[in-house]
Structure formats: C-alpha cells, structure tokens
Amino acid sequence: MKLAVTGASGFIGRHVLRCLGARGDVELVAMSRVPMPEDTLPSGCRHVSLDIEDASAVADSFERLGRPDAVIHLAWSGLPNYKSLHHFETQLPQQYAFLKALVDGGLRSLTCTGTCFEYGMRSGALAEDMSAQPGNPYGFAKDALRRQLEFLRASKPFSLTWARLFYMYGAGQPASSLYPLLQAAIQRGDARFPMSGGEQLRDFLPVTEIARIIAALGVDHQDTGTVNVCSGKPVSVRSMVEGWCRESGSDIALELGKYPYPDYEPMAFWGADQKLRRVLAAGGG
C-alpha cells in the first residue's frame, strides 16, 4: 500500500511516520509545507513539500503525492488558538479544496483527524453517536469539514475515517502546552509551577499511543466513520501533572489556581472508547 501522511513534520505527524515506518508493509510519502531533515524520515520514505494554502499546488496534489492508495490527513494551521475565526474563514475552505482534489484525482481511502471540541460544551462521557455541537471556531471548522466530506462521499465514493482526538502529551509537543511547560520549569530548577486549579477532568493519552492508533486506523481499519481516539478514563489535570512530576523525579510545587479555567471547554469530559476498542480488536490493532 502506498500511503501519504500530511502534516508529517508536526507534533503528531512525526510520531505517526515512525509508527508506519516500523511496519514494513507501507510505501510512505511524507507531506509538509517545508522540507524535512533526512534523519526525521523513516527509511525509504519520500518527502513532498506542498502547502495546501497554495491553490496552484493543490490542483495536482494527488499526482505530486504519487497517487497514493490512502492518505492520513493531519495538517491544520492556527493552533492552539481555538477561538480564531481563521479556522473557518481560511482553513476550512482550503482544507476541503485540498481533500476534494485528492478524491477527484482518485484517492480511495482517507483518514482525517478531528477534535473532541466537536462535541461542544458537554460534560461526562462523549460518544460518537452524540450529535456534534461545537462551541468554538476550531471545533466548528473541523465538524464542518467532516460534514463536507460526507456529502462529497455521497457523490464520489471513498473510504472515510474521522478520528476525533482528545488530549495528548509527549516529546515534540508545542512549547506552549502544559506538558512541555512543566518539563521546562523542572529543567530550569523552578521552585513553583503556575497552573489552573487542576480539578477539570480530561482524557489523556501519550502521543506515541495516539500515533499508533492513527496509523492502525489509516492502514488496517479504513472506512470506520467517526471514532474517538481516547483512553476512556477521566483523570484530573492536577493528577496528570503530579504524575509527570513523579516521573521526572521533581518536587516542584504546584501553584494551583494561578490561571483561570479555559472558558471554551466544560469542566469534566472524556471520551467513550467502546467503538475504538471494537475496531482495533477486529483487526488486531
């Protein structure tokens, strides 16, 4: 199988490439806006520089990617500003134009990453059969793209998997995220780490596990529809941070309540993982 990964130089993309490169049964193409160093690419992986914001480049993108059998689409700009209108004013039409060009060119299988923010301001366990009620521009744009692709598939059939991501952490995460901020504070020898009250419940997975799941969905479980990529286990942010401190052997004090809780997400939500477990078990993933 020839498989292309977009957003290959990003936080998730680099881990997905590593997972796919270790399989040995996939001919890989890595796509990013800028060149990637050779030592970041798996053996035999070809790189293609392509910016989906360049309409002229998008027109023949399927050919430039080598006419892949499947695409894992991770590319998205404008994060982590979830409230920016850029997500639906700019990214949404550009994303759809790019993916439609791939389908029009002959793409047979597409795996896209969505977001738990598509569920909106709901509390508790979030399951795939719940209607989407996005409450911020990023969640709205992602859900709108999913709907557009489903309409497209009705007129030009292709396999579609929509992987809704919850919370992740790990090596290479953007510096403004909680995990790298804590690691940087520990490395500096800071006495205190300022954060929110930490009582919000979330669903966390290490990025290595998320990458493994995405790779399995893109190769072994195509046409799954919408599926949560999550642990299914609610945990408080404070507990996660305390665990990271223990793993690092740090006694840094947590300055709880220094920052307010985000207003774009509810206090307690996590993913229902029953569908994910069924899908992966069906193919040994």
Image (tube, rainbow, N blue to C red):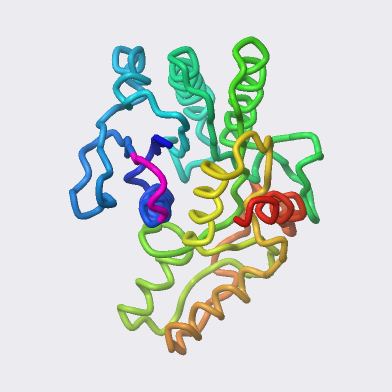
Q: Where does residue 263 sit, x and y in percent of width and height?
A: 65, 49
Does the magenta portion include 116? no
Residue 267 occupies quadrant: bottom right
Q: Which residues are magenta?
A: 23-28
Residue 259 occupies quadrant: bottom right
**Position above or below: 87 against 228:** above
Q: What residue do we see at 62% from left, 56% from top?
A: 284
Q: What residue do we see at 56% from left, 53% from top?
A: 213
| Along the line of sight, the residue nearer the viewer: 131 or 121 | 131
Q: Main secondary structure of the magenta part?
A: loop
Q: Where does residue 173 sit, x and y in percent of width and height?
A: 40, 58
Quarter holding the N terminus is top left
**Position above or below: 231 against 100:** below
| Along the line of sight, the residue nearer the viewer: 113 or 30 | 30
Q: Where does residue 43 sit, x and y in percent of width and height?
A: 25, 51
Q: What residue do we see at 47% from left, 45% from top?
A: 80
**Position above or below: 41 against 66:** below
Q: What residue do we see at 25% from left, 37% from top?
A: 47
Q: Is residue 63 left or right of residue 76?
A: left
